[in-house]
Structure formats: C-alpha cells, structure tokens
Amino acid sequence: MTITLSQQTREKLKGVSTATLCAALFKRGLRNQFIQDVRPLSQKKTNMVGQAFTLRYIPAREDLNTLDVFRNPEHPSAPPSSAARRAPC
C-alpha cells in the first residue's frame, strides 16, 4: 500500500518541529520513531519533509541457512504475508 503526501500536507509539516512530531507519535504508542544525528548536506533553508520507509534486514548465516529457508513464511527474513501488508495502521 502506497500513501503519498499531498503538497498541502508537506507545506504544513515544514512548520512542525521534530520534537512535536515525536511527541505526537509517542502519544499514539509509537516509541523511538526518530533517527539521531541526521544532518543536512548543505546549509539549512527549509525543514526536510518526505515519506519514510521501514527497512528490515536480518542477514542469513551462510553456515546454517541455505536459500531454501526463505521459502518458509515463518522465517524472520521472509517477506510479510499479504494479510500483514493489508493490516490497518
């Protein structure tokens, strides 16, 4: 499921501080929803606003796992089931 931000929402979020966003997420039960020490490559002109993507990486142990383990949906590195992808946030 892809959710895009409208230009109006992007403009509104440019005026919101990171602390305010983190507090709002914290109140909704989402803990540790931030990345520390992110810095702009050039001088700050406006706040950075955009979509975030969750990445999950669990490397397989070559001495224990063959590529066949990834066919098992219960394996930690397997892609989420279609039911999990459709679950409401």
Image: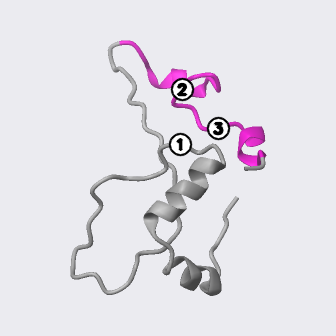
Q: Amino acid at mark 1?
A: Arg
**Res 80 label:** 3
Residue 29 visible from this viewpoint: yes
Please give left or right for residue 33 compared with residue 28 in the image. Answer: left
* Gap in angstroms between the C-alphas marked 1 and 3: 22 Å
Where does label 1 land, which residue? 31
Q: Residue, x 63% and y 49% (percent of image)?
A: 27
Q: Residue, x 53% and y 42% (percent of image)?
A: 31
Reply above or below: 64 against 27: above
Q: Position of residue 57 (x, y in %)?
A: 43, 37
Judged from this view, the residue extending furthest toward the top is 64
Magenta stretch in the rendered image: 64-87
Q: Residue, x 21% and y 80% (percent of image)?
A: 42
Does 75 lie within the magenta span?
yes
Mark before the other along the chain sequence, 1 or 3: 1
> Quarter-wise, where is residue 46 in the image?
bottom left
Q: Residue, x 46% and y 70% (percent of image)?
A: 17
Where does label 2 land, which residue? 76
Q: Amino acid at mark 2?
A: Pro
Does 81 lie within the magenta span?
yes
Other-residue count near label 3 (Cα within 10 Å), few / some / many at <14 / 14–19 / ≥20: few
Other-residue count near label 2 (Cα within 10 Å), few / some / many at <14 / 14–19 / ≥20: some
